[in-house]
Amino acid sequence: AQSVSQHNHHVILSEAASLELGCNYSYGGTVNLFWYVQYPGQHLQLLLKYFSGDPLVKGIKGFEAEFIKSKFSFNLRKPSVQWSDTAEYFCAVKGTSGTYKYIFGTGTRLKVLA
Amino acid sequence: DAGITQSPRHKVTETGTPVTLRCHQTENHRYMYWYRQDPGHGLRLIHYSYGVKDTDKGEVSDGYSVSRSKTEDFLLTLESATSSQTSVYFCAISLQGRDTEAFFGQGTRLTVV
């Protein structure tokens, strides 16, 4: 069955600290990978996506993620977090054939202390 | 933001009553999805649609039904609401095919008392 695992449920960092959020997926085929962000009280917004090509993808607000196919991983990184990065982050996977369902992880709640 | 409107945005209903949530899009995207968001569970897919009158179940479809009679509208119905269906419901849309992302609506907060 398709699934996404996010290992960190809650992360607390101070401003300027580096961030890495883990994401592993289980899927029997070629995939698209995504990170979405949800600021308090808001809907999900796309942070970045991987479709093909360079496994290191850059998104908005200084975020980047690396797709490591051999590890079925798509970890999110940011060199220096800001207080405004406080949000919940979701990793998602979608197959590239058949029916196009987006499967989400359970999310990581990030709190950045000023 | 993608043209997705969910209604109502907030609703309180009593156990055992039917409830219908509406998702309306102006993007002409073929795929539409209903998710529920609960603490500790992330987003779980309830039902999705890949075209008018074409729908399929997601991972948590029990107690829910959907209908899509027009490209722009996707309705989610709780036939007889239960307290376990208290949640935030999100509609999403996407284009058909690989290499596409989903766009989300603002969400509907449903409370079943």
Image: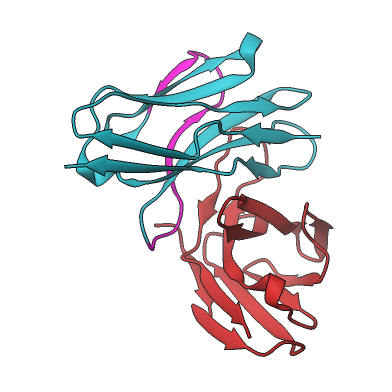
Chain colours: A cyan, B red
Camera-side residue of B112 and B50: B112
Asked which quadrant contains residue B23, the reply is: bottom right
Asked which quadrant contains residue B111, the reply is: bottom right
- Residue at 50 percent across and 80 percent down: it is B10
Residue A62 appears in view: yes
Say left or right for A74 vs A94.
left
- Residue B68: x %, y % from top left: 74, 70
Say left or right for B95 vs A75.
right
- Residue A25: x %, y % from top left: 66, 27
**From the viewer's perspective, is residue B84 above or below residue B113?**
above
- Residue at 58 percent across and 58 percent down: it is B37
Q: Which residues are magenta?
A: A41-58
Q: Is residue A54 magenta?
A: yes
- Of the 4 image quadrants, the one containing the C terminus of chain B is bottom right
- Residue B5: x %, y % from top left: 50, 71
- Residue at 72 percent across and 87 percent down: it is B15
Camera-side residue of B50 and A106: A106
